[in-house]
Image (cartoon, helix red, strand yellow):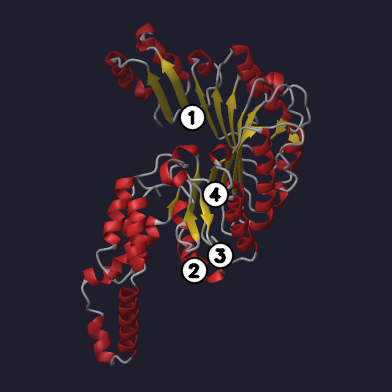
Amino acid sequence: MDLDATTSTILSFESDESMRGSVSQTVDLNFHTRSQMSEQQVRCARSISAQAEVLGNEDLLGVIFASAQPVLVNVEETMPSSWAARDILRIALTCKNFYEPAISVLWRSMISWAPLLRLIPSVVQREGIFTTDSPIMVEDLSRFNFYAKQIQHFNLTPKHAKGKNSLPVSSHLGALLAHHRRLENILFPVLQTLTIDMSSMLPGGIPILFLLPPAALKDIRLKWTNPFDRHVASSFINVLSQLSPALSCLHLEGYLADGTLDVRRVHDFKQLREVSLKLSPEGQNMTAIPDLWSQLTNLQHLTTLCLSLPGSEYLGQFYVPCVFNSLDTFNIKGPMDSVVVILRLIKVSHLLNFNLTLDEASLAGLSRMKTLLPASLASLSIHSVCVDAIINFSPDIQSIDIVSVCAASIIPNAFFAKFSSISRLRKLSICLEVINFLFVESLHSAKWKWPNL
């Protein structure tokens, strides 16, 4: 939430004790009045207007205010735009009925620690850094926790770390907050999704990172680029295995080398359903991969595995077959030779959905790949630049994404005639380098070939 000015407005509004007292008195009075209502008065109250019904329903108001946020097109984009956040803030300050549900929506997604740290009385900004001018007492965390319990999404990535939201945290402040977290004086009870790019961690940011893992966390995305960050990622995964038993999605992106990513605790995630790995080689050292596979096979409820692969020269040093009995969806992105290596390595007897994104393709590689796919497949999709490779892959393809087609260099009717044998096609996406109306017209006239499209 990148709203310094609006945050200060919220805090000044929230700190108006006289207003808050009058509101609570009104609530108490209304409660006692309702308890003394006669049966006839209750029946009359039921005829209250629809507007009043809405104004009295915080859950419904929360849904209405949440609709002020734009539609999210990226799973990592959980933040409302600045204009939407300001609109929600104005709504919050309109009347007391709106305040709680609107503030709840406004604080639902966070992109910085700054707004939370400013809620602690002893935290100050000094020489461009967050630090303290006195000890942090338990009672000092009341406002911090009031808003922390609203947060459902936390996104700590470089593109959000800017301006006053990107101030470093002193090691002293980080240690104090970590101490209160161990004592459970700091909690994030409804945090469900967490996205962390280690490269965005400012000095002092690592300790407060470990304040976050709650029991309700379901989706974690970790990205790192240097050796130290990999050790932090390992420690964080171990903490998650102890504090976040409900985790269902684990996304890891970074360099893997021997001993730098400890995944021995992965099997502790009893509810883990989806794992996504973007593997980047460092030199020739990829010897940690076999151990990673063996740990993943221990996940009894794993249903979705997503892999982004380096070249096969980094994968050829380990041929240890692994069996995934529960896997039904397999997504792979990478060069053809790497995909073939992985399909030989991983055995998936009950696979239903296979989604393939090829950086490059060869007909010979596709022929080898076809022999490795299980007969149980119900859905097969392919995303590639090579049109001929797609067509020769399988007549059972249901989804096709063709990247970067030069429409001026092909004959449209002949192009679509190649796809006539793919009778099960349900989705066809073609990215043209230049708009070609003849190409579009030919596509429209050829669509009868695919009744399920």
Using the image as rendered, state which of residue 312 and residue 202 is in the foreground.
202
Disc 4 secondary structure class: loop
Give the quarter of the image for residue 374: top right
Name the residue tied to disc 3.
136
For marks 4 and 1, give the one nearer the viewer: 4
Q: Which label's residue is closer to the chain start, 4 or 3?
A: 3
Give the Cα separation between the discs numbered 2 and 1.
54 Å
For marks 2 and 4, give the one nearer the viewer: 4
Mark 2: few/some/many CA within 10 Å (<14, 14-19, 20+): some
Mark 1: few/some/many CA within 10 Å (<14, 14-19, 20+): many
Name the residue tied to disc 2.
142
Residue 398's mark?
A: 1
Disc 1 secondary structure class: loop
Name the residue tied to disc 4.
169
Q: Amino acid at mark 1?
A: Gln
Left or right: where does residue 381 sit relative to residue 31?
right
Q: Whole-percent x and y of residue 31? A: 34, 84
For marks 2 and 3, give the one nearer the viewer: 3
Using the image as rendered, state which of residue 241 and residue 21 is in the foreground.
21
> Residue at position x 71%, y 39% from top?
261
Q: Whole-percent x and y of residue 62? A: 35, 61
Give the Cα separation between the discs numbered 3 and 1.
59 Å
Quadrant the C terminus occupies: top left
Left or right: where does residue 102 sit relative to residue 388?
left
Q: Which label's residue is closer to the chain start, 2 or 3?
A: 3
Mark 4: few/some/many CA within 10 Å (<14, 14-19, 20+): many
Using the image as rendered, state which of residue 334 and residue 92 is in the foreground.
92
Q: Which label's residue is closer to the chain start, 3 or 1?
A: 3
Disc 3 secondary structure class: loop
